[in-house]
Amino acid sequence: MSVLKQKNLGQQWGVFATLAGQLSIFIAMLNLLLLITTAYNTTLRGWFEHYNIPLNFWTFTGSVALLLTIAASLLYKFALPSFFSFLNDQAYRHDNPIRKDIEKLQKTLDSNLKEVEGRLEKLEKGVEE
């Protein structure tokens, strides 16, 4: 279907999306810190005290950090290989200058190979005669 066919919008959108994605890491870290602080102070601390769970703010924050570290390890082990495999496939398909250079080199090698094979054939005939 032509509706699902991908379109190349040029590099400007890619630059913006990449910078926004990289910036979002820092925004997310700040947001998480504020969210943990707010959640602990407004909701969780009272709940922990009510059920006699001895979990102070730093222990709670450390627990969240530990869970995020485990999640990051699992992503590194299992998700990243798939992610990069997909990105490599997309980069190869969509206007990759390296691919174009390799195709040019391959054409040059193919034409040179034919020339070398022709010379070799002439040499072999000369030796046989």
Image: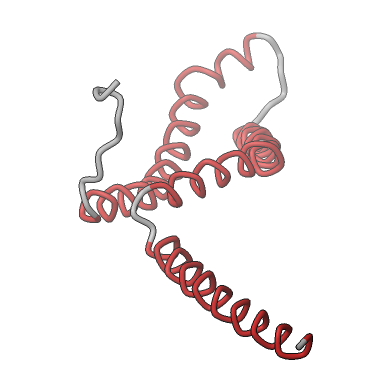
Question: Which residue occupies 71% across, 14% down?
Answer: 52
User: Viewed as shown, does residue 107 lie left or right of 47?
Assistant: left
Q: Where is 102 relative to 86, above or below?
A: below
Question: Which residue occupies 70% across, 41% down?
Answer: 73
Percent coordinates x, y for residue 33 in the rendering? 47, 40
Percent coordinates x, y for residue 55 in the rendering? 68, 27
Residue 4, quarter of the rendered image? top left
Q: Where is 127 relative to 23, above or below?
A: below
Who is closer to the viewer here, 31 or 11?
A: 11
Residue extending farthest front? 129
Q: Where is 79 relative to 92, above or below?
A: above
* Quadrant containing the N terminus in the rendered view: top left
Q: Where is 79 relative to 12, above or below?
A: above
Question: Which residue occupies 46% across, 37% down?
Answer: 32
* Quadrant containing the C terminus in the rendered view: bottom right
Who is closer to the viewer here, 48 or 126?
A: 126
On the question of residue 59 being in view, the answer is no
